[in-house]
Image: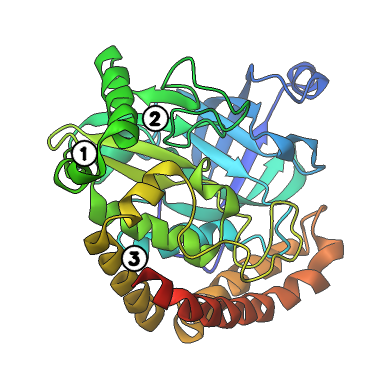
Amino acid sequence: MENNSQNNLPIYQVYIHPLDLIELKRDIWCDDPVPAKLTIGRRKLNIDIAYRGSHIRKSKKKSYHISFFKPAHFRNAKELHLNAEYTDPSLIRNKLSLDFFSDIGVLSPQSRHVFLKINGKNEGVYLELESVDEHFLASRYLPKGAIFYAVDGDANFSLMSDLDKEVKKSLVLGYQKKFGTDQDDFFLQEMILKVNTMLRSEFEAEIERYIHIDKYLRWLAGVVFTQNYDGFVHNYALYRNGDTGQFEIIPWDYDATWGRDVNGKYMNEDYVRIEGFNTLTARILDVPIYRKRYKMLLQQIMKEQFTTEYMNHKVDQLVSDVRPYLLQDPYEKERISNFDQEPEFISRYIQARTKYIKSKLPTLD
């Protein structure tokens, strides 16, 4: 999958037998897939397809999870995600965010916009997302290691549940193991336990056995700049490097960013504080040397990547790629005037967020 934008969007044609299509639509909350065929250019693939997401399943424009059946792998992947991006009036925020994370040194899924047809009917512009799994690691020549998805608010690096405010019955609550062994469950629980129980005097000396601090601070900066409110206890995956034993954090689902919330509504530029949230972040930023590194990192990114000059070019390229296809998108073509206003909206957000972050930098001293 290419991370760079393209002038012409790939056309994905899916055929689902009418009876299977009825079964798929019967219950939008069912995760059981139905068989289908996918044609990309000259390639014809047998696949399984199902709806994906949580609240987005209620949208008119559905998002899909595709698993390759025959062949079992395509472009070094066993599955992919097609996101409708329906609540984002720009349709580019997710990709813009994931590419931004990659630019500042954070492991991040690759993505590209495609145009989807189902049974000959235009479904519109979608964002194809790389799955974070063992193939994600292999394509980057990274050591094998466990991958856990943060599936709900209990993935908060705490001993306390974010959902019911009680002590967790298990420290793997909030996580779904995508790849790994039973022993990796133990490593995850050990990391969370250490984060919460190490004495303040021990923390600085011991935490880097469990967490890659530089990567974590870069991820934290990315969440703070893009202002993904859910990103601290959700919308991420954990990768435990099999060689170092350290956990790294990978962003996921970043459409509610760049000044808009999960419903696509305006979000004030000061909504997410500069220190972020969650127990691990609080403990890391309690260490003076890490606070200093974080402050320097924020300043560096504001000079190099989080600027209107740097980001406007990326926004304009994505908009020029996507816009011609919106006229064929049955869910978006009536909203194209909103789409056309988004580049300026994102640019204003960058300016306002920069001003806010600069005003709060002294709190990190």
Q: Vertical placement of 284 versus 120: above or below?
A: below
Q: Nearer the viewer, mark 1 or mark 2?
A: 1
Q: The residue under label 1 is which amino acid type? A: Gln
Marks 1/3: CA distance?
A: 19 Å
Crowd class of label 1 (few under 14; some 14 to 19; many from 20; radius 10 Å): some
- Name the residue at the bottom extreme: 309
Can you tell which quarter of the image residue 191 is in? top left
Closest to the observer: 1 or 215?
215
Q: The residue under label 2 is which amino acid type? A: Phe
Q: Which residue is mark 1?
A: 246
Disc 2 on helix, strand or loop? Answer: strand
Q: Which residue is mark 2?
A: 148
Disc 1 on helix, strand or loop? Answer: loop
Horizontal side of residue 4 vs 272, given as left or right: left
Marks 1/2: CA distance?
A: 13 Å
State the residue at coordinates (34%, 65%).
Answer: 104
Q: Which residue is mark 3?
A: 104
Can you tell which quarter of the image residue 52 is in? top right
- The x and y percentages for residue 56 are 72, 40
State the residue at coordinates (63%, 65%).
Answer: 322
Q: Quadrant of the C terminus?
A: bottom left
- The x and y percentages for residue 85 are 67, 51
